[in-house]
Amino acid sequence: MIVFLSFAPIEFMGGAERMIYKLATFIKKHEDVVVINADPTIANLYGSVVLQRKFTERITATERKNNLNKIKIHVRDLLPYSKGWKVIHNYLLEARLIYIKYEILELFFLFYFGGLNIRKKTIASLHSPLLYDKPTKLFDRIHTLVYSSRFNQLMLKHMQKIHVLNIRDEAFLQEMYGLNNVVRVPNSLPFKKSDESKSHIHNRKKLFILFVGELSIRKGADILINLIKNSSDDYIFSVAGDGPLREELISECKDKTNWKYYGYLNQSELKNVYSQNDILFAPSRAEGLSLVMLEALSHGLQLVGYDTILSDFLDLAKVPSKHNIVKEYEIIFENILIEKKKNEYSTTKQKIKKYFVENFSDIKVLPIIQKKIFALNI
């Protein structure tokens, strides 16, 4: 049996939760699987205080029918040796492997219910960034302080495996920490041919720019706001997502007519939006390997963003030469628009799609995860 342990409710279906859901669904064909995460009451208390948002349920009816064995951690289960505590404790003890999203709250659940020795059969998955670049919020500073500490090095050393998603984290853990239990396998997505006939990007006189994600400082939404405010009508922005900077975005950009705000979009709705854009703008200051980036690649969108989060895509991405600032992105957008006007962009889109299929499609990645991470030779 394999236990998947994550603090955020799986029904939230953020990037990490979607990947855990997919892995659990894939693995349960070959071995028993249990998904353990916090009840929304606990999760939303933390979300409101620390993240300034709640874990809204986003799971679709089709996904709900999957019948994964899910266990919720309720407040009453935190009482040591209570009935609920024992249920979770026994699942952890009986598991062959425990796959966790490696963050402080997941570690608390792991050791509180399983004991310190449980880490010997635990796979620590770095779905979230190991370190935050220039953290601004108190929690981000604490996160970076803890994860760059000697304590964290010793903790990871005694995990069975460390599953990293990108080259940056792999190099840091191997070179700076000297760890030899690091396995790099990226996130993945199914590949489906997009219907280009519905695309509006045939207009070569304009550049269509998409931002998808949490509207927060960490995700670079402040940079997005300043870009839209100072942009010419040559650039058409689409923004999908929600978060703490939502009201600031709407207020600061209310006089601009070259942008559209969609709010939160589900996967089906997003496909339409991807097909109508040229590039995905990703100025995030901290990222693991975003599923949004992979979705954009599968639709042939070029990535434009901060080089620290695009280290796996530098051959296909455009990044600032020095700083994660508005002026440098304006230069990048101008150069891409020149390429588009010369009709050189259709070749780029096909190259990007081919790269996605060869490196990040489910058919390529899932068998590798099955073997390298979960030791299932089928």
Image (cartoon, helix red, strand yellow):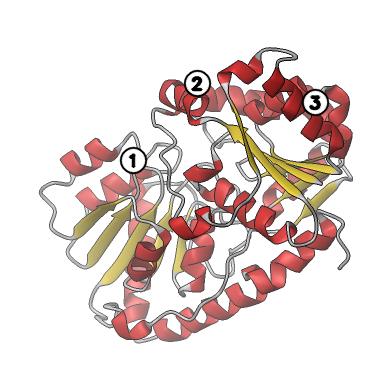
- What residue occupies the far front of the structure in this picture? 83
Q: Which residue is mark 1?
A: 222
Q: Residues within 10 Å of mark 1 (few under 14, many from 20)?
A: some
| Cα distance in 3D space between marks 1 and 3 | 41 Å
| Cα distance in 3D space between marks 2 and 1 | 18 Å
The secondary structure type at the circle numbered 1 is: helix
Identified by mark 3, the residue type is: Gly
| Cα distance in 3D space between marks 3 and 2 | 29 Å
Task: Measuring from the top left, give residue 270's x and y in whole percent.
Answer: 37, 63
Residue at 65% x, 17% y is 78
Q: In which quadrant of the rendered image does the C terminus lie?
A: bottom right
Task: Measuring from the top left, give residue 24's x and y in whole percent.
Answer: 68, 53
Q: Which residue is mark 3?
A: 114
Task: Measuring from the top left, give residue 308's x and y in whole percent.
Answer: 58, 49
The secondary structure type at the circle numbered 3 is: helix
Q: Which residue is mark 2?
A: 138
